Amino acid sequence: MNLLVPLKMVPDLVEELTLNEAGTGLDRDALTYKLNEFDDQALEEALELKALHGGTVIVAGLDTPDIDQVFYTAIAKGADRAVKITGQFDPLVDSWTAAAAMAPVVASLEVDLVLAGVQAPDDLYGQLPVLLAGRLGWPHVSVVSGIELDPQARIARCHQEYSGGVMAAMETALPAVLGVQAARKTPRYAPISRIRQVMKEAKLEEVAAAPAADGGRPKVRRLFKPESQGHARMLEGDVTSQIEQLVGLLAERGLLKVRV
Amino acid sequence: MAPVVVIAEQLGGVLNDVSLELLGKGRQLAQGLGEPLVALLAGDQLDSLAASLRTADRVLLLEDEGLAHFTPDAYEQVLAEALKDLEPRLVLIGNTSAGMDLAAGLSGRLNWTLAAYCTDLRVEGTALVAVAQLYGGKLFAEVELGTSAAIASVIPGSFPADAVKSGEGRATVERLPVKLPPGRVRFHELIAPETSAVDIKKVPVLVSVGRGIGGAENVEIAEDLARALGGEIAASRPVVDSGWLPKARQVGKSGMTVRPKLYVALGISGAPEHLQGMKDAEFIVAVNTDSSAPIFETAHIGVVADALEFVPALTERLTAGA
């Protein structure tokens, strides 16, 4: 079984996001990038499935800032191959472009199952797993956990999660793309020493992206921060003062008496 | 005629609220565009559900026992066929789990423009403009959907559902022919949520913890506060995924939707998926170290502080007596 995990860098949302001069996108220079957290979940699940069934875990991503480091970390965690798709990409490459660039590469790698992070914080044009499946003509299921593989029957079983804690148990024929919501356990860490060793020894593979046709994407007029009239009233002062204000507000609303 | 089409969603024979929300908004947009509003629903034995969609100008059903439960493969196929014939200007889909599969899947199959995570849509002259949530709610994008067919997936709760009273309309209900493809994805069963001694949907005070509290060992300080407030503990998704608290305590899109009298959010950044489950709480207090965290846009009261320092002090103050 060949399992492939697309990896994508996204802005670290802990940092302040600054708009570019035109107000139509983020100021790339002011950003700190990190791996999309759902991709980390997908990678963990792929490594767990490999531990159960054997096979190969391939990580693939577009040539964008810091992606090499993410590849080395993935190899240090247990991925077998890393494929960098080269071309002129915006550091904040969108999911539509990523799917278009990635699909021919996935098709060429004899992949049985793509495990992709279910979403990314900048998926304005749709989510990568579904867009990728569409281009490959493969079945897909999004928002899944509880993945099981049956390599003999060539199926993957999974749970699609709905609101209210309800789930649907489904199975899909392989090859397929699953949009991973959560791995069976918390994503592992790779020791720095191991990553350093991988950086010396491992070789990243490179494949040039085929030029993609345009289309599919609505035109962005502007980005803006949420209007702040609905903003919380912020309690100022030191902790003691903040607590006194809060206790006062709770008491006013009778919320200190709501006891069961 | 290029109608506005709402793809309604049902699970186990129950209509998702987002379908009525979309019908309300869809009516407004259809009027602005001078086009009809069509409700499209796939499933099996849909008679009673179809009645709730009759405020649309047409209700179209894709009914087949093979569609009784959602599978992305079959639903996408039959909906794509129906949409091709309808030649819509705009397709509205709820940004639910199934909606995520459908919106991007249909966009790919039909090569129609998609804007995901929409929170608002409006008509400007002949143009359709959508507002979509980005970067965990820290930014919004205003996008133009063009003049040909486009799809918008809309975050549930963005529009009122009561703009449409179910059963009020008089639209006739039509059934479309269904040609099901050989299924590559098969449905097995629906799994009900695990039961818990405490139903967080029924508790008046919830103290909810997010990743910002740092580790499982710190859940206790939130539990102490919950006790002092006469409430229960709840959590955001990452906390549950990390195994710090059980799934039955999870608030948000894939957890519970709660409306307590008091919701205290500790170290919760306020990702859209979490807000979806708690934004209608009567009084929301958020404690976070990041003053720009989106949770402060939804909370009534905000405290920029380290929860690990603030919460024990608050608990002590409460247990010492007001």
Image (cartoon, coloured by chain):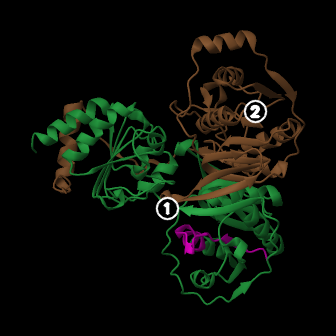
Residue B2 counted in the magenta span: yes
Number of numbered discs: 2
Q: Viewer-nearest of labels 1 and 2?
A: 2
- Residue A237 placement (x, y as % from top left): 25, 32
Give residue B196's quadrant in the image. bottom left
Label pair 1/2, CB-CB below 8 angstroms: no
Span shown in magenta: B1-23
- Position of residue B181 relative to residue A80, above or below, is below
Q: Quadrant of the N terminus of chain A?
A: top right
Find residue A55 and name its label.
2
Q: Relative to the observer, which residue lies in front, B234 or B80? A: B234
Q: In the shown orientation, is residue B301 left or right of residue A218?
A: left
Identify the residue at image location x=72%, y=77%. B64
Quick one: which chain is green? B
Q: Could you give the CA–CA distance between mark 1 and mark 2, rounded to whole angstroms?
A: 33 Å
Hue used for the chain lettered A: brown
Q: Quadrant of the C terminus of chain A?
A: bottom left
- Residue B141 placement (x, y as % from top left): 62, 48
Which residue bears the numbered disc 1? B192
Residue B272 counted in the magenta span: no
Q: Please, which chain is the residue tagged with disc 2 on?
A: A
